[in-house]
Amino acid sequence: MTLSATANKVIDQITSDTTKLGDIKKLAKDIKSDHDLAVELWSTGQHHPRLLATLIFDKKRLDQTAIDQLAEDLLTHDETERNQLTDWLLAAQLTKSRPLTRLMESWQDHPSPVLRRLFWYHQARLRWTGQTPPGNSEALMASLEAGLAKEQPDVQWAMN
């Protein structure tokens, strides 16, 4: 993908060795929501541009197909970057929209380990934050006990 001048300017701002996460968050606050720019930043495959993209995606334009692609792209990152990107995507987009939350609630058995991790992490966050659990606690515990040992490490972390 050929990047716009705006995307190149933003990338130059956030890809130095001295870039802090707070710098990325501040820039996102200034940009607000810009889905097209987010798609351009995501297409770079770079960690910092993708972090910014997670903050400026338009959640109304994210659907299962787009999220499946994001999850596949996340597998190109090492575990630390992948987990950070996943956490930012969850916090900035997926939990801020009822349709996306409903999608996330369907990912318990999704083929993508990234999306399964998001499912379990979301379930844990519901309980950590004191929100009323969705009434699936018994079934969730049974699934946890049956599947924890077989899951990939990233997913196991969220299940714990």
Image (cartoon, rainbow, N blue to C red):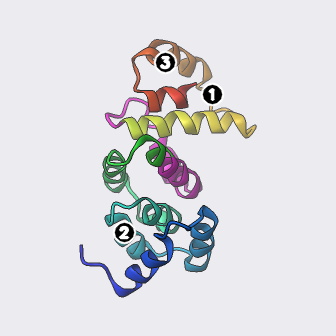
Query: Mark 1 belongs to which amino acid?
Result: Gly
Q: Quadrant of residue 127?
A: top right
Closer to us: 11 or 75: 11
Q: Quadrant of the C terminus?
A: top right
Percent position (x, y) of residue 106?
Answer: 43, 37
Q: Is residue 74 above or below residue 16?
A: above
Instruction: Please tell me whether residue 98 belongs to the stretch shown in magenta.
Output: yes
- What range is drawn magenta here? 84-112
Are the two marked residues, 2 and 1, in contact with CB atoms closer than 8 angstroms? no
Say the numbered circle drawn on residue 39: 2
Which residue occupies 54% across, 48% down?
87
Few, some or many C-alpha atoms within 10 Å of disc 1 (few <14, some 14-19, many ≥20)?
few
Q: Is residue 6 above or below residue 18?
A: below
Task: Please tell me whether mark 1 sits on a helix, a strand or a loop.
Answer: loop
Q: Quadrant of the N terminus?
A: bottom left
Which residue occupies 49% across, 45% down?
102
According to the picture, the residue beneath numbered tag 1 turns out to be 135
Spatial separation of the CA atoms under disc 3 and disc 2: 35 Å
Which residue occupies 38% across, 35% down?
113
According to the picture, the residue beneath numbered tag 3 turns out to be 143
Of labels 1 and 3, the one closer to you: 3
Query: Mark 3 belongs to which amino acid?
Result: Ser
Task: Please tell me whether mark 2 sits on a helix, a strand or a loop.
Answer: helix
Q: Is residue 118 above or below residue 28?
A: above
**Which mark sits nearer the N-terminus, 1 or 3?**
1
